[in-house]
Structures are given as structure tokens and as C-alpha cells.
Amino acid sequence: MRKESLRLLEQSGHDIDTASQLLKIKIYYASVFFAEQAAEKSIKALHIEKKRRAEFTHDLVELAQGLDAPRDVVKAAAELSPDYIITRCPDAANGVPATLYDKESAAGHLCTGE
């Protein structure tokens, strides 16, 4: 496996851990952000391995489609992709991101089922 891929996957693991910890302490919007980041880094690592090039986009749907991912993966990417911006930008969220997520939505982004 290429060094770039390994680094992305290692950071992705840390991002999942961070998202899980944030969920436990009820900082839901940040948990969702780190869940999105973990997914993005993981799929970018897969791009590097399969396509032998890095992709410079934050669009998870574009990344998944570029790998000919199954429909359910593309659907999951479509649900998670907007959170890259919504969790950080009140203008994009049409409100305060910290107030938009609850325990169930954050857990769903992590697929924990909590």
C-alpha cells in the first residue's frame, strides 16, 4: 500500500475515534464533521490505491462514483457529503451548526445505531 494511502487511513481512524468521543460528550455537530472527514479520507485512500492518483474534491458522491461504488455506497456518500460544509458554516447551514444535530443524527452518521 502506498504511503499516502496509509497516512490517509491512519488519520481516518483517528477521525472516527474523535467522532465517537465527541458523540459521547454530546458535541454532535463536530462528531458529524469528523465522521464525514473519516469517510472522505478513507475513500481518497482507495482512490490512490485503485486509480493511482489523488482526488482533490470534498464531494463524496463524486469520489464514490469515480470508483464505481455500489448504489448503497453512493447513497450513503450523498447523505454524508453535505455535512462537510453544513457542520462548519452557519451560512450554508441556514443556522448555527451546533444546534442542527442531535444524538440520533450524529450516531447515524457514525453508523453506531445509538
Image (cartoon, grey):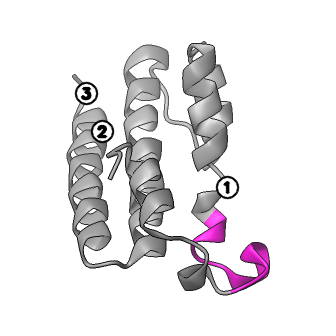
Question: Horizontal placement of 87 versus 3: left or right?
Answer: right
Q: Position of residue 78 (x, y in %)?
A: 67, 39
Residue at mark 1 to residue at mark 3: CA–CA distance: 29 Å
Which residue bears the numbered disc 2? 4
| Image-quadrant location for residue 73 | top right
Q: Residue at x 40, y 25 (%)?
A: 46
- Which residue is drawn at the image coordinates 70% and 84% (left, top)? 90
> Alpha-carbon neighbours of circle 2 within 10 Å: few (<14), some, or many (≥20)?
some
Inspect the image, locate mark 2, and give the three-letter code of the amino acid beneath it: Glu
Q: Position of residue 4 (x, y in %)?
A: 30, 38
**Label 1 vs label 3, nearer the camera:** 1
Question: 69 or 95, which is in the foreground?
Answer: 95
Residue 57: tell me if it is visible: no
| Residue range corresponding to the magenta coloring | 85-95
Please name the amino acid that badge 3 sits on: Arg
Q: Earlier in the sequence, mark 1 or mark 2?
A: 2
Q: Amino acid at mark 1?
A: Pro
Classify mark 3: residues with Cα within 10 Å, few (<14), some (14-19) or many (20+). few
- The quadrant in which residue 6 appears is top left
Tell me which label, 1 or 3, sits earlier in the chain. Answer: 3
- Label pair 3/2, CB-CB below 8 angstroms: yes
Q: Secondary structure at mark 3?
A: loop
Q: Secondary structure at mark 2?
A: helix
**Mark 3 sits on what residue?**
2
